Image (cartoon, helix red, strand yellow):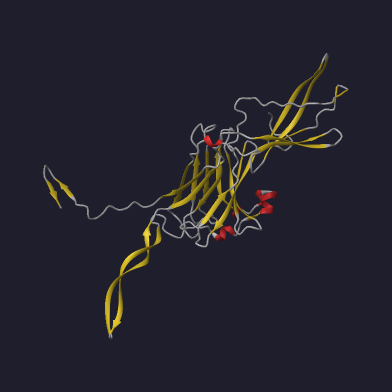
Amino acid sequence: MTGPYEGAPFGLSVVVPAKAGPFDLGTVVVRAKVEVDVHTAQLTVTTDPLPQIVGGVPVNLRLVNVTINRLNFTYNPTDCEPTSVSGTMTGGQGAIAHLESHFQVTNCASLGFKPGFKASTSAKTSRKDGASLHVKLTYPKESIGRDANIALVKVELPKQLPSRLSTLQKACTAAQFESDPAGCPAASIVGHAKATTPILPVPLEGPAYFVSHGGEAFPSLIVVLQGYGVTVDLVGTTFISKQGITSSTFKTVPDVPVESFELTLPQGPDSALAANADLCSPTKTKLVKKKVTVRSKVHGHTQKREVTRRVRQAVPTTLSMPTEFVAQNGVVLHQSTHIQVTGCPRVAASANVAKMKVGRGVTRRG
C-alpha cells in the first residue's frame, strides 16, 4: 500500500522479482491507483501498463496471480446477495477483455442487528434562527463479524419540527454540487456530520448540504464525509407530506462497519428546521368522547341537554420520530425515537404541598 497516486487516495506498489530459470533480470515494480466510490465505498484498482520488455527481453504474460492475505486487512460484506469481482484487461495491442467472477458470502441471516439511536433538540427556538436537531447512531463494540451493517435509514420528524421552506429554496444545484461542492451557496450548508469506522484510523466528517435535482419535488440532504483521503457521500431523499411532516430516507449506505455516526442540524438564519410549537410541552390533536351541552327549541322554549360527542382536543404528547432501520442482511427494525428537549425550565413545585415547620423537638403542621 502507498499514499495517494494518480489522483486516487491510495496506491499500490507491486514488486516482482523478474526471474526465469537461470535468468535474473532484477526487480519489476508496477504502480496502481486505488479509487473509492463516493456512494458505495467500492474499491477500483487500476494498474499502470504492465511491462512488455524487461532487460531487453520480450515478456509474454500468461498469468497474473494476486493474493491478499494480511490479517484484518479486508472484511466480508454482510449482504449475502450474489455479486461479483469484475474488471477490464487491456492487451498490449489494445484489445479489451471484460472479466467477472462470481462472489457471494453465506450465513448473513445469523448476524445480529442492534444499532443504538438517540436524538435531541434545544428548547430555545425562534422565528429568526429556527430549531436544532442532533442525532447519534452507535454500534456495539467489536461488532465486526457479529452484526450486519446498516443498509437503509428512514426518519420522520415530528410535526413540531417542520422543514424550513426558506432554506430549502436556497439549495445548491446538482450541477454545481457534482462539479465542486465548495462552490455551493453558504446557505445550502445546513449541518455537519461525523462518522467513525474501525477500517480507518481517523473519523470521516464534513458538511451536510441541501441539493436540488430537477426531477425531485424537494432537495436531497447530502452528507459529505471526508478523512484519510477518502470521500463518501450519504444521500438522503427528502419528502414533506400534506400534513407538513418531513421524512428523510438514506437508501444507499455503504456495507462497511461503523462505530458511530452523528449529524447536527444547528439553529441559524438558514437552519434546516423550524419550530411551530412549545417543544417543552408538545401537544397533539386527538378525537375524544366528551359530554357537551346543546340547546334546542321545543314548543318555543329553549331547552338544554347533555350529549356525548367526539370532539378534537389538544392532549399532551412526547416529542418523538418514527424510525426505520434496514440491515444489509435484510433485517428491519421499527422504533419510535424519543427526542430529548434540552434547556426546558424546571417545573415549579406544587403550592398544595403541606408545609412543615420544625422547632426544637416540636413539629407543627401548617
Q: Image point 36% across, 66% down: which residue?
A: 310
Query: Is 30 placed left or right of 270 in the picture?
Result: right
Residue farthest to the bottom, as pictured: 300
Residue 239, percent across and down? 56, 56
Left or right for 4, reference 54: left
The reply, left or right, for residue 108 in relation to residue 339 is right
Q: Nearer the viewer, residue 10 or 76?
A: 76
Q: Reply above or below: 271 against 112.
A: below
How many numbered callouts?
0
Report the front residue among 95 and 268.
95
**In which quadrant is the N terminus drawn?**
top right
Residue 97 figure quarter: top right
The quadrant holding residue 75 is top right
Quarter-wise, where is residue 14 in the image? Answer: top right
Residue 296, horizontal then vertical, whole percent:
30, 79
Residue 96 point in image, percent of width and height: 81, 37
Left or right: residue 362 compared with residue 334: left
Q: Residue furthest top?
A: 22
* Whole-percent x, y for residue 228 in the image: 63, 36
Which is nearer the eye, 155 or 107? 107
Q: Write the residue at 59% across / 43% down.
A: 253
